[in-house]
């Protein structure tokens, strides 16, 4: 982050307007960025959805939560949460 004097780059009327709010203070102006959707640039969301669907399918076929947790390197509570969410997804699609 570079320090830049406002008088060197801003019009005087804008400086006077800013002085009404922050007279004599240092003001940080963040870079302009586009809003990014979570996972918008990656396939992570789709990969997790696929993984969760596989976990639910395997659980439905009789595989235990303990075994699934070991196979997917997740906590048993995470497997339970995934199964609960997948049940809700399927229930809402009926």
Image (tube, helix red, strand yellow):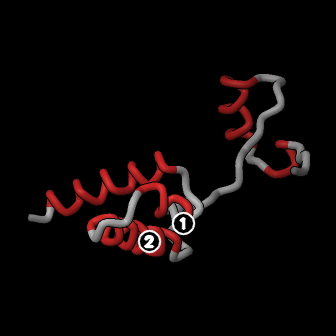
How far across and how far down the image is residue 5, in percent? 89, 43
Of residues 84 and 2, the one nearer the viewer is: 84
Of residues 76 and 42, the one nearer the viewer is: 76
| Residue 49 vertical position relative to residue 28 in the rendered view, above or below | below
How far across and how far down the image is residue 11, in percent? 74, 47
Which residue in the protein does label 1 denote? 72
Which residue in the protein does label 2 denote? 51
Q: Are marks 2 and 1 in contact (CB under 8 Å)?
A: yes
Q: Residue at x 19, y 63 (%)?
A: 90
Q: Could you say whether the residue bearing mark 1 is in a helix, strand or loop?
A: helix
How far across and how far down the image is residue 63, in percent? 37, 66
Residue 5 appears in the picture as rendered: yes
> How far separated are the C-alphas under marks 2 and 1?
9 Å
Residue 35 appears in the picture as rendered: no
Q: Residue at x 42, y 56 (%)?
A: 65
Q: Could you say whether the residue bearing mark 2 is in a helix, strand or loop?
A: helix
How far across and how far down the image is residue 25, in percent? 82, 25
| Residue 28 vertical position relative to residue 40 in the rendered view, above or below | above
Q: Residue at x 39, y 59 (%)?
A: 64
Residue projecting furthest to the left:
94
Q: Residue at x 55, y 57 (%)?
A: 74
The image quarter containing residue 61 is bottom left
User: In the image, is 1 to the left or to the right of 28?
Assistant: right
| Mark 2 burial class by Cα count in 10 Å: few <14, some 14-19, many 20+ | some
Q: For the residues carrying marks 2 and 1, which lies nearer the camera in this image?
A: 1
Q: If you read the primary sequence from the N terminus, does the residue marked by circle 2 or circle 1 appear first?
A: 2
The quadrant of the image that shows the C terminus is: bottom left
């Amino acid at each position: 982050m570079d320090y830049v004097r406002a008088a060197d780059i801003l019009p005087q009327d804008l400086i006077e307007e800013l002085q009404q709010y922050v007279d004599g203070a240092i003001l940080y102006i963040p870079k302009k960025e586009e809003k990014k959707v979570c996972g918008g640039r990656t396939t992570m969301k789709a990969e997790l959805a696929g993984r969760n669907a596989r976990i639910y399918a395997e659980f439905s076929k009789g595989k235990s939560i303990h075994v699934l947790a070991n196979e997917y390197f997740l906590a048993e509570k995470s497997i339970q949460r995934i199964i609960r969410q997948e049940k809700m997804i399927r229930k809402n699609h009926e």
